[in-house]
Image (cartoon, rainbow, N blue to C red):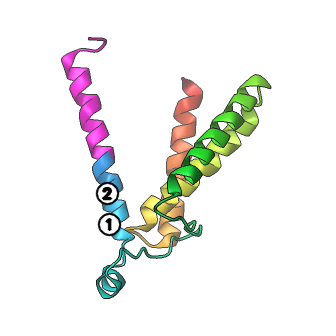
Amino acid sequence: MKHSLKVTTLLLLLFLLAQFIGIAVLQQYIDAEKSAETGEIVFAQLPIVERPPLEEETSYVTIMLAILLGTGFAFLLMRFQLIWLWKVWFFFALMITLLVAFAAFLPIWLSFVLAFSCRRHMLARSAKI
């Protein structure tokens, strides 16, 4: 094995923790009352961005296209060594992700403050590496 059993176990536990946190965030955005009325899962409005309209049969096409475009954009940033643009992209992606996750449990203003402070801490740590 590449890692010791202790490190492998820690990585597995962190992975499982991330999955459980994701399920908890998703559960908070499900509107239980409307879902019970309609018989289909109805999601509540996201705090800052609009949920894209996706059909179950074709949603994989949109997701694959987004992954391919994002990967291509990342390769272009690496090719032309646009590190500042990479950091700006990372900043916005991290802010939106943290804001949506925190807003599932907290008021929007507190979610923004937490997302910004976590983002600043993560960027400070990555600069030292």
Instruction: Say what amino acid the circle numbered 2 marks.
Output: Ile
Task: From the top left corner, tell me how far across and down residue 85 is, in percent.
Answer: 74, 38
Q: Secondary structure at mark 1?
A: helix
Residue located farthest toward the bottom when viewing the structure as drawn: 37
The amino acid sitting under disc 1 is Gln
Instruction: Judge left or right: residue 40 versus residue 118.
Output: left
Location of residue 79 by image quarter: top right
In the rendered image, the quadrant that contains the C terminus is: top right
Q: Which residues are magenta?
A: 1-18
Residue at the disc numbered 1: 27
Seen at 69% across and 29% down, the residue is 75
Q: Is residue 72 left or right of residue 99?
A: right
Would residue 87 be counted in the magenta stretch? no
Which residue is the site of mark 2?
Answer: 23
Q: Residue furthest top?
A: 1
Position of the N terminus, as image quadrant, is top left
* Residue density around tag 1, few if under 14, some if 14–19, many if 20 or more, within 10 Å: few
What's the residue at 41%, 69% (across, down)?
Answer: 106
**Is 8 colored magenta in this rendering?**
yes
Vertical relation: 5 (above or below) 57:
above
